[in-house]
Image (cartoon, helix red, strand yellow):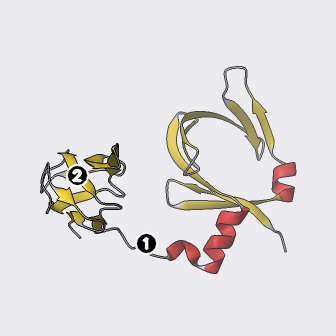
Amino acid sequence: MKEDLFSLEVDSNQVFSFGTEDLKNLDLVSTPEGDYHIIHDSKSIEVRIIKSDLNNKTYTIEMDGVEHTVRIKGKLDLLIDKMGLSKIDVQEVQYIHAPMPGLILDLMVKEGQEVNENDALLILEAMKMENVIKSPRKGIIRSIPVEKGEAIDKSTLLIEFEK
């Protein structure tokens, strides 16, 4: 039985698995321009990486003039899939509470506003320090039950997201 080292998912509809022997037999050459030349089944293929997202192991490549999206899964990713752990739903944060008592210095968002992960929501002054509270997720602000200039206690509800 061959052990897969990694798999390539191409355009979300084709999956290719590679093992140790496959890698040994791969005829891949890097060109001086930074592209790649592959010979597969006596056929020459030119490959150019257009965009790469290393965190998500996703690449946009051009192969013989056609663009493709490729996602690479390594040995650990394949094990996580095999164990069924990649299908676990993550509960999204719906409420943001004050991590400490303080004073609301500024509100940077409004109810109904769409925000992205890490967008600044408000500034909370605590112990003479300004703390920027950022969004933990992408979503729409449902309510902001605090006001600029309001003194708040620890655990006070600051922001509520729509579900």
Q: Quadrant of the N terminus?
A: bottom right
Q: Residue at 77% across / 47% down in the picture?
A: 41
Label 1 sits on a secondary structure element that is loop
In this rendered view, identify the residue nearer to me: 5 or 120: 120
Give percent across and percent down for residue 45. Answer: 67, 37
In the image, residue 106 sits, relative to residue 141, either above or below, namely: above
Q: Residue at 39% across / 73% down in the picture?
A: 91
Left or right? Give the position of 103 relative to 129: left
In the image, residue 13 sits, relative to residue 117, either above or below, namely: below
In this rendered view, identify the residue nearer to me: 32 or 113: 113
In this rendered view, identify the residue nearer to me: 142 or 13: 142
Q: Quadrant of the C terminus?
A: bottom left
The amino acid on which the numbered mark 1 sits, given as a three-letter code, is Val
Give percent across and percent down for residue 160. Answer: 21, 65
State the separation of the CA atoms marked 1 and 2. 32 Å
Q: Residue at 29% across / 45% down in the picture?
A: 120
Specify the label residue 90 is tagged with: 1
Q: Quadrant of residue 150?
A: bottom left
Specify the label residue 98 is tagged with: none
Specify the label residue 103 is tagged with: 2
Callout 1 crowding tier (Cα within 10 Å): few <14, some 14–19, many ≥20: few
